[in-house]
Image: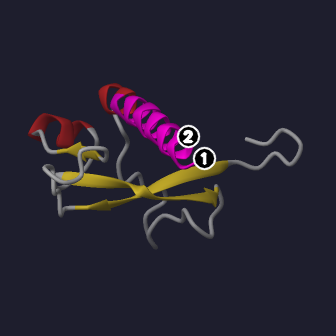
Amino acid sequence: MDPATRRGMVEVAYGTTNLKPEKRRLDLIIMNSVQIDECGLSHATRFDLDRIVRLPWCLEYFRPPQGVPEARIGKLNLRQQERLKRLADVRRQIAQIQAERDA
């Protein structure tokens, strides 16, 4: 949240059931049935970390379906949150190495 404006932003990654685990090793892939249930997903899902957008936390983007007072599609459990942090670190390191190589 930005204290000055009191507005929050959310980073959202595109999720797909097209897993491609052998090709997309630096994406967050949840395919264990226990993890799928814990995260509130209906299928094994790959979150494409190349397709992240920042959205303002507002009704325009995060409105529950009509007739449902509160909806939560899914939530990463602690294990998946840690995996996501490690993947983000590795991706930053790779980007830094590529930038140094290209300089």
Q: Residues within 10 Å of mark 2 (few under 14, many from 20)?
A: few
Quarter of the image where one finds residue 30: top left
Q: Amino acid at mark 2?
A: Glu
Q: Are marks 1 and 2 in contact (CB under 8 Å)?
A: yes
> Is 92 in the magenta?
yes
Q: Secondary structure at mark 2?
A: helix
Q: Which residues are magenta?
A: 83-103
Residue 25 at x, y = what percent?
Answer: 24, 45
Per the image, the residue denoted by label 1 is: 103
Quarter of the image where one finds residue 42: bottom left
Question: Is 65 on the left or on the right of 102, as rendered?
Answer: left
Q: Residues within 10 Å of mark 1 (few under 14, many from 20)?
A: few
- Quarter containing the N terminus: top right
Q: How is the image coloured?
A: secondary structure
Which residue: 89% across, 43% down? 4
Work out how far the residue at label 1 is from the one at label 2, CA to CA, in angstroms: 5 Å
Q: Amino acid at mark 1?
A: Ala
Per the image, the residue denoted by label 2 is: 100
Is 84 situated above or below 78? Answer: below
> Is 76 in the magenta?
no
Which residue: 48% across, 64% down? 64
